[in-house]
Image (tube, rainbow, N blue to C red):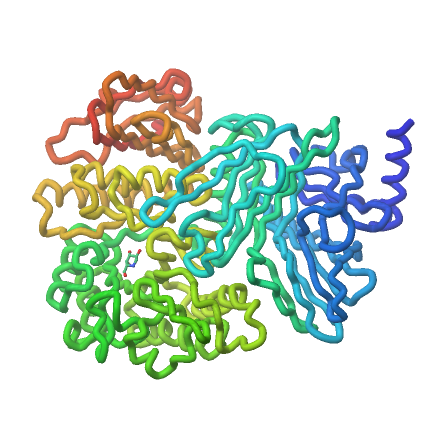
Amino acid sequence: MKQKFTLLLLSFCTTLFFGQGKMPIIISTNNTALVYTLNHKKQLTQLYFGKALQNANEYNLKSPNNLPAIITAGAGPVREPAFGVTHADHNPSLELVYVNHQTTQNGDIQETKIELKDPAYPFYITLYFKAYQKENVIEQWAVVKHQEKAAVTLNHFASAFLQLTANQYYLTHFFGDWANEMRIEETKLPEGIHSIQSKLGTRATNFDNPSFMLSVDQPASENSGEVLAGTLAWSGNFNLDFENIQYSEDFGNLLQVLPSINNYDSDYVLKPNTEFKTPTFIYTLSYKGKGQASRNLHHWAINYGVYHGQNHKRTLLNNWEATQFNFDEQKLTHLIENAHEIGVDVFLLDDGWFGNKYPRNSDNAGLGDWEPNKKKLPDGLPFLVDQAKKNKVMFGIWVEPEMVNPKSELYEKHPDWVLKLPNRETDLRRSQLVLDLTNPKVQDYVFGVVDKILTQNPGIGYIKWDCNRYMTNPYSPYLKDKQSNLFIDYTLGLYSVLNKLRQKHPNIELMWCSGGGGRAEYGGLKYADEFWPSDNTDPLQRIYIQYGYSYFFPMSIQAAHVTNWGNQPLKFKIDVAMAGKLGFDIQIDEMKPEEKELAKTAVQNYKRLETVINEGSLYRLKAPYNSHNASWMIVSPNQDKAIFYAYNLNVLFGDVFEPIKFQGLDSKKRYRLTEINLMQNQKPQVPQNNQTFSGDYLMKIGIPWYLNGSIKSSILELNAIN
Ligand code: DGJ
């Protein structure tokens, strides 16, 4: 009887609020649906979030739970609010009711827009959703605007608000520090609010990444369990709130997930008739564990999330680890020749090429003065670009245009262009200050720096955009009485520069870097082709770091360089770098002839396989955390090719290594196994080299683990044969 009544009530709402035949609002990918309906107050309620039904009409059959989907501050249930505002008349409360919605299909993407309004104020929030059908990923954000008589102050501005019900929740989060990024920790969520935050302003992902995986009732494994994986596309302060509260005996606990710009010191003053757009929150539900969640996100990233995600991935030689600040034209010319010799696509000139009054010979001077240093580079950039052209490599260059050393001409000229607190001692980090990107003049300057380099040197095709300090001294001379807009407006200012840059220089390849992995997030990757995961390139450490990032970011966009960090054999270093976007940052001349040959072979192999690495599906087979070996594989979309990576890290007495069972292959196809990246005269390590097996055999029985001894690595290429 009770259920009948609920159904009746539900259909009444349908007709009243959404119009005949249009109810409820279904945001759906091929296998996941987020469904909204309304309660009697015309507030949005989340009817369902889970596996998509085959027949969309059947969502109507579910009894509504009447829980408002969006908690607003000052009105309604007292839980962590998704949105909050102090209106122009100082009323600190917000109510939101449904106005209308619209759903359109645009190729693979279902787009939904839901308009909400405060019934008592001309204050509007529009929710946007993009549901990527094939990838099973949803992207969600909100736009706030108003026509009140004066500015309002926004104090909560979540990008999404998902509600789950279960008995227990397990949260996997990713944290670390410089040179130790993306460590993994899984914890059972206690009751109350748990937050993953950054307050760093710039290089915001230095300690925590704005990404998580969440499983219900029990920890998910790689291949089983229901997992919600999400990541916030924002380069500034973020806050992922998980509010876990007792709900009812029937449903267990209610978990509210609120990914958001961090509102720490950020009450945002919004003038009438202007828009505030939250960053997008990207999420996926996997019913086959964390592995599938990662694959969904990777496919989304390559198809939509990363700038030119589908483009050819260029290999490169960088000079940072090889020379630091100590170089001249001759040294660089030689390195460019080295780049040609080992066959990479790009030579990347790093920090130290600029500054004259204050030469950039260390990190304590010159930042901000983007003129080539006349002593090191008497013929300027054109000479080097020309050398690169002669050697058939593309020229790339490092910039850090958001920052300035006090020892610079820029600072002397524009001391008011930096973030600096009045009446306080200025806090320097890496001897530098942050430019005030809230100021449109500074934005123009920053754009101008990069634009000038690219316009004057059309041969430059690659930029490494660095950012080497987090924000302290949080005061903008430009914002005057609106200081609480600083953190948000800084990031918006940065995006405005990057937008302009992309409009004028759409084809430049851009590496998003921040003193290591301080900007590993999809906000910047909208403009960047790849990111620098960590300054730590010791392969024994890098394995963990790249493995951690692989939960959210495709391997192909993780720049991975072979350097002098670590004293492992070159083969081991190359095999670790080859799992990401292969590059070198090492004195090629110091390599033994056989090592140089290996480097050349690896580059050729990479070029042949880079589409598989970029477009393929990643299967994590063995985590470096659980034992002393690690392995994963990437399978091409048509399952004709796969690359298998194996590493023995630090073998201890008594270690027993399980056989390798491959994943993701076509069980009906036969595959030839070929070991690649071998040193000249090195015998294949895998006993099954050149043998063929069915995908079925490889996935069910597999091959015995074959790497014996510490610091051993092997890469196998699997090719389907006719
Ligand atoms: C930090 C980066 O992570 C390094 O790769 C290098 O570019 C230095 N900055 C240069 O200052």
Q: In this rendering, would 145 be left or right of 429?
A: right
x%, y% of residue 467? 37, 61
The answer to whether residue 349 is above or below residue 208 is below
x%, y% of residue 60? 80, 37
Total numbered badges shown on the rendered structure: 0
Q: In the depicted view, which residue is nearer to us: 347 or 285? A: 285
x%, y% of residue 80? 66, 48
Find ligand 1 in the image and state its quadrant: bottom left
Q: In this rendering, would 676 be left or right of 38?
A: left
**Residue visible at 43% across and 45% down?**
553
**Residue visible at 58% across and 49% down?**
259
Q: In this rendering, would 87 be left or right of 383?
A: right
Q: Which of the image's four quarters has the C terminus?
A: top left
**Residue visible at 43% across and 22% down?**
668
Residue that sits furthest to the bottom in the current view: 413
Instruction: Please tell me in which quadrant of the rendered image residue 575 appears.
Output: top left
Instruction: Please tell me in which quadrant of the rendered image residue 99 appears.
Output: bottom right
x%, y% of residue 124? 73, 62
Q: Which of the image's four quarters has the N terminus?
A: top right
The answer to whether residue 525 is above or below residue 39 is below
Instruction: Please tell me in which quadrant of the rendered image residue 718 appears.
Output: top left
Viewer can see residue 447:
no
**Residue visible at 39% across and 44% down?**
176
Q: In the depicted view, which residue is nearer to us: 652 or 303? A: 652
